[in-house]
Image: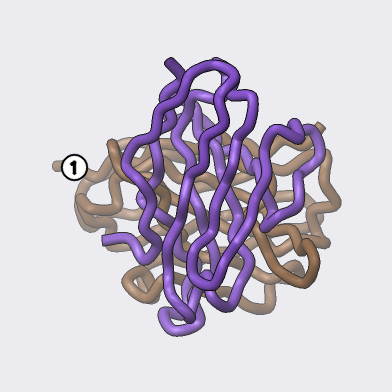
Amino acid sequence: QSALTQEASVSGTVGQTVTLSCTGNSNNIGSYAVGWYQQISHGAPKTVMFGNSLPSGIPDRFSGSKSETTASLTISGLQPEDEADYYCSTYDSSLITWVFGGGTKLTVL
Amino acid sequence: EVQLVESGGGLVQPGGSLRLSCIASGITFHDYWMTWVRQAPGKGLEWVGTIKPDGSETKFVDSLTGRFTISRDNAMNSLYLIMNSLRTEDTAVYHCANFRSVSDYYFFDFWGPGTLVSVSS
């Protein structure tokens, strides 16, 4: 059971906008910024969002936001290369550990 | 270009030990908190532990405290994970990553491809 809850799967067509969510509580998402990590075919994860800031090299089709205890990753103009597993993560001050969501499998139809 | 490359994984019997290494290039290694994250087969990511830039402090997930140790050699741009009393549930791909501070919060930044540890008799 992950401390953060993500949709198991989300799908969208090329060019569409999709939003992935990550729900926690006041000890994690409610208190800290959330990172988002893309993993293609169980390879090396790649950071696609620092809270609401884009890492260098990540297209601005990706955006991040947070409202209270839920964080969101929005991908606009969906591309085939966006198909991947996406994980959210943040610090949890109650568990005193870094926590991850269970991951969302994004399929591009 | 930033590269983090792990090595040292393999097949080990329950109760055995293993030392994983991670060599970094393209970053000022001694400036960063470094971390290990693992992924069991078919499962999600799990934080293992973290070490301070000067190596003076380490933090682990509670379930691993006492069995796992993290160290680093800043002169060699190297990070290590020493795993003792290994259990079958430690079977996973182990990734190293650096932490980056952005707007006063810390995030995982660059990641290595990982090294597979299989614990089985």
Judging by the rendered image, the residue that carries numbered circle 1 is B120
Q: Which residue is drawn at 78% across and 39% down?
A: B25
Tell me the subunit letter for badge 1. B
| Picture layout, residue A61 above or below residue B70 | above
Residue A17 location (% of width, % of height):
57, 31
Could you say which quadrant of the image residue B117 lies in?
A: top left
| Picture layout, residue B5 above or below residue A93 | above
Could you say which quadrant of the image residue A82 lies in?
A: top right
Pick whichever, B63 or A16, lies toward us: A16
Chain B display color? brown
Q: Residue at x 44, y 35 (%)?
A: A85
Chain A display color? purple
Please state, as top left, top right, bottom left or bottom right, where the C terminus of chain B lies in the image. top left
Pick whichever, A73 or A83, lies toward us: A73
Q: Which residue is drawn at 81% across and 39% down?
A: A56
Could you say which quadrant of the image residue B57 lies in?
A: bottom right
Residue B10 location (% of width, % of height):
36, 36
Q: Which residue is drawn at 59% across and 42% down?
A: A74
Residue A95 as seen in the image, left or right of residue B70:
left
